[in-house]
Every structure is written in C-alpha cells, then in structure tokens.
C-alpha cells in the first residue's frame, strides 16, 4: 500500500549495514549493493533536511541456547575444527554510509551511533533515549536482515509507540521466503511499507527534531 504520511519528527534507523553482514558478494534475496545504495540515498536525504540518522551495528549475539548455534558447534566438532571467529572488521560500518559533506553539504548534527548485541536495536541500547531526546515520533527502517534485525527493531519500535515505516527496497535477507514473510505477514501490522523514493517524497523540509535535542 502507498505510504500515508511521514511525521515532522522522523528519524532514519539503519540496521547492520556493516562489513561483516552487508558483504557485496553475499547471497541474498536482493543484491546487497542495490540495498546499500538505496539506504545511502535515503540517509543523505535525511541529512540534507537536518533529520536524525541512526547507524546501528551489531557486535555479538544474545547468550541463550539456540538450535542454530548447537548445530554449528556439532558440525565443527564432527569436522575436527572450531567455529571461526568473526573477522576483525566485522562490526565496522560500511564507509559509504558515513556522512559526506560532498554529497549533502555540511551536516546540521552528527549521526547517532548505536551498538547492539541482539537482533533488535532497542534492547540493551540507548536508542529509545536518543530518539526521545529529539522528540522523534516516527522511524523509517532499512537494513539487513529483513526478518531478523529489521523486523525485531520494527516490533520494538511499535511497542514503544513509534509510527513505523519500512523502506522495502533498502532491505534484504539471506532467504527470499523470510524476506517476503516479514513483508507480507508482519510489517503491515507494525506500520507502513513503501520505497525509498516514496519516503523521500514525503519527508518534511524542517529540522524540528534536531532543534528539540538542542533545547
């Protein structure tokens, strides 16, 4: 369905577009370079309007037992190996997501950086406090993976009372079925979906959220 509106106090939340996850050679439902390019374009549109951009990266996982982790450990043991450690640059933000004065002009405020250890960006982080300090009432979500980090963050945002918009052409998943499951069955109950172009067309021109943070 077409997006209805974007609140004046809106923030962009970018999920896990980092070197260890958004690898251009990774097999995903939609090409990672296209997803990243769309996310960059949307982030620049927010920055140009003085609207907050939140860049979220992940450095670990929740400690609970899971079947996936057990299967990985059993497979490694059977092969006489160990589960390989993440690369040293796993959690580094993709450089193209960094703010660029050449693309957008001088930024009115620095991007907000959030580091998480679970799928969702709210649990155990300062994300809610950062958004509340800026008077944010709506978030636009992009990133990888649709059914994990993006959906988990969308669920929590909805529960916190934020209006939620999901830019579908700026997210993807390792599984096409998982991506479509979130898009068709979950997202419509949490907010509204649309494209990056549709979001940009509705963005407010002012800088009210940053002004709120300065008061």
Image (cartoon, rainbow, N blue to C red):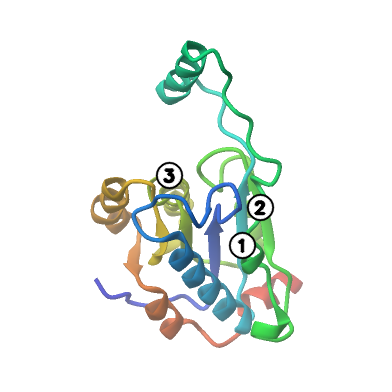
Say whether residue 102 is left or right of residue 157: right
Disc on the earlier residue, 3 or 2: 2
Report the residue at 37% width, 79% height from top: 198
- 170 above or below 153? below
Distance Cα–Cα, label 1 vs label 2: 7 Å
Query: Residue 54: which disc?
Result: 1
Q: Are dots 1 and 3 in contact, CB under 8 Å?
A: no
Query: Residue 114: which disc?
Result: 2
- 25 above or below 199? above
Disc on the earlier residue, 1 or 2: 1
At mark 2, the secondary structure is strand
Q: Which residue is situated farthest in the front direction here?
A: 79
Q: Quadrant of residue 129?
A: bottom right
Query: Residue 148: which disc?
Result: 3
Q: Are dots 1 and 2 in contact, CB under 8 Å?
A: yes
Distance Cα–Cα, label 1 vs label 3: 18 Å
Report the residue at 59% width, 86% height from top: 206
Q: Residues within 10 Å of mark 2 (few under 14, many from 20)?
A: some
């Amino acid at each position: 369905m077409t997006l209805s509106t974007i609140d004046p106090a809106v923030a962009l939340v970018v999920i896990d577009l980092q070197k260890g996850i958004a690898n251009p050679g990774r097999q995903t439902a939609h090409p990672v370079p296209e997803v990243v390019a769309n996310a960059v374009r949307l982030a620049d549109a927010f920055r140009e309007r003085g609207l907050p951009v939140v860049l979220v990266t992940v450095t670990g996982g929740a400690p609970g037992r899971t079947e996936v982790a057990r299967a990985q450990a059993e497979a490694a043991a059977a092969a006489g190996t160990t589960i390989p450690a993440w690369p040293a640059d796993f959690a580094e933000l993709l450089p193209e997501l960094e703010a660029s004065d050449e693309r957008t002009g001088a930024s009115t405020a620095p991007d907000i950086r959030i580091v998480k250890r679970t799928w969702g960006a709210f649990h155990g982080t300062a994300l809610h406090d950062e958004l509340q300090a800026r008077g944010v009432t709506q978030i636009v979500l992009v990133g990888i993976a649709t059914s994990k980090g993006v959906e988990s963050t969308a669920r929590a945002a909805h529960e916190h009372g934020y209006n939620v918009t999901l830019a579908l052409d700026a997210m993807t998943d390792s599984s096409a079925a998982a991506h479509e499951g979130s898009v068709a069955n979950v997202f419509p109950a949490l907010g509204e979906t649309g494209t990056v172009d549709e979001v940009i067309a509705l963005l407010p021109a002012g800088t009210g959220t940053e002004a709120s943070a300065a008061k």
